[in-house]
Image (cartoon, rainbow, N blue to C red):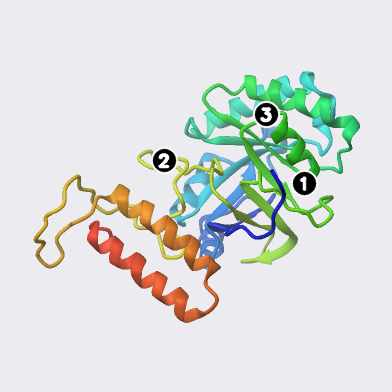
Amino acid sequence: MPDTNNRTATARGIDCSTPLTGAKARQIAAAGHQFAARYLVPQEYKWKRLTRAEAEAITAAGMQVVSVFETTANRPAGGAVYGNSDGVAALKEAQAIRQPQGSAIYFAVDYDAQPGDYDAIEAYLKAAAAQIPGYEAGVYASYAVVEEMAKRKACKHFWQTYAWSRGKESSYANLYQYRNNVQVAGVEVDLNRSYGNEGWWNTNTNTSPAQTPSSSPTPNPSASPNTDSANPNPAEGEITMTREDAEKIIRFLSAAWFAAADQASKDEFNRLANEVRRAAGIQAE
């Protein structure tokens, strides 16, 4: 599968080591971000550790959560032994914060790994994956590592960083980190974009972990009613579309919104998204 820089992103987001308060999460969402990647790590790393309360704050702000496990940058070079212990630790944290099963836990290869490291990294990822039953393993890494681990089927989700990638972007990447050390809402963050199958999640138990953020390009409609049928002759304000179909259509409109070349086009996609929301009984914004 060749690399490409011409794919259409479905959402924008951030990652950071700073725990986010409710106010900061809302400000980051207001700045146009639809997901936040945070560290799923043990208590001894509490300065960067994701908690249930923070996950709830991120969700309340209309964003999705991406979980990433990292203690030291080159730990995956330690192979299966480290993968086993890190998988156990990641599972404990995921269960503690009630991360929903079916979502992803990314394991970071946060250095310029060379081909001589690939066997150990593969063993690390597969060992970690074996220790997180109910969750799906992913890897955060450079272009070369993402490409190689995808070919080896070492995990199911791929988050590429531009670092050490020498200008290449893998088409395997579900997430792509394209800039580091940016200030958003007074928090130092890295900037990312997503392409689907991210494995993110939220604390709303009735929401699928894989759902596209409802805040892109318009705010979260999560508290609205659902329906399973449509009236062929609707009255004003009557529900004519299921919520499930509406969310599918809005996902495509969201991708078009990000690809739009001018504000007029963005406004039109936003209008269409609101018409779909109205048809499904979801509050329009």
Q: Amino acid at mark 3?
A: Lys
| Element at label 3 | loop
User: What is the quadrant of the N terminus in the image?
Assistant: top right
Q: Residues within 10 Å of mark 1 (few under 14, many from 20)?
A: many
- First in sequence, mark 2 or 3: give its number: 3
Q: Which residue is mark 1?
A: 143
Q: Please say whether residue 142 is visible from this viewpoint.
A: no
Cβ atoms at labels 2 and 3 below 8 Å apart: no
- Tell me what residue is drawn at x 36 percent, y 53 percent: 247
Position of residue 246 in the picture relative to residue 114 (left or right): left
2 vs 1, front mark: 1
Mark 2 and mark 3: Cα distance apart in space = 24 Å
Residue 21, x across and y down, in percent: 55, 54
| Element at label 2 | loop
- First in sequence, mark 2 or 1: give its number: 1
Checking the image for residue 208, the label placed there is: 2
Q: Which residue is mark 3?
A: 153
Position of residue 159 in the picture relative to residue 73 (left or right): left
